[in-house]
Amino acid sequence: MQALIFDCDGTLADTMPAHYQAWVEILRPHGVVFAEDRFYSMGGMPTGKILDTLFAEVGRIPDVVALTRQKESAFIEKLGEIRPIEKVVDIARRARGRTPMAVASGGHRHMVEMTLRQIGILDWFSVVIAAEDTARHKPEPDVFLEAARRLGVAPGLCTVYEDTDLGVEAARRAGMGWVDVRSL
């Protein structure tokens, strides 16, 4: 493989428990229940899409902008708890400076960059693709294809590191090799 593309949350950084706690906090006042197993099954989806889905199920329309801000604020309060996922970060560490690397996430850029900065690896990646960089999101392949394009590497020569079924499916659809980090 000529390039490595990493998801951020749950792949490079152990953020998923903090994200879940933030979701529970902001949804509770609205009476919206978000089961933990469902949260994990929606990994890789942008916040707005999750909000639309959850609120549609209870017959309401969310204020996506306000709730996204609240969710991000709740997560930022927990940022100090975030740690790297060492087995994946070690892969990136060994490839650093030798293999082109990107981060491709369903999160918003400022949140992804804040997370990578928290675990001390933001400067390892020449490309960071976030939710606002593509119109379609995982399981669609767009975020990975855009990362490959910006790295200047053909999709078939890229390996994606992912922690969700949606992300693995997006990598498959992009024609890329993939590693499910849950099995490492």
Image (tube, grey):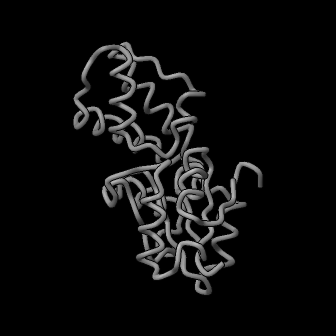
Residue sitting farthest toward the right: 184
124 or 151: nearer the eye? 151
| Residue 137 position within the rendered picture, expressed as x and y whole percent measured from the top left | 41, 50
Q: Position of residue 48 (x, y in %)?
A: 32, 38
Q: Is residue 79 left or right of residue 91?
A: left
Q: Is residue 62 left or right of residue 40?
A: left
Give whichever of 97, 44 is nearer the camera. 44
Q: Is residue 95 above or below residue 132?
A: below
In which quadrant will I find the C terminus? bottom right
Q: Residue at x 61, y 81 (%)?
A: 2
Q: Position of residue 165 (x, y in %)?
A: 61, 44
In this rendered view, identify the residue nearer to me: 60 or 17: 60
> Which residue lies at the image location 41% right of the left edge and 61% below the top edge?
113
Q: Is residue 51 above or below residue 82?
A: above
Q: Is residue 44 left or right of residue 12?
A: left
Residue shown at 62% from the left, 86% from the top:
98
**On the rendered structure, is 63 left or right of 175?**
left
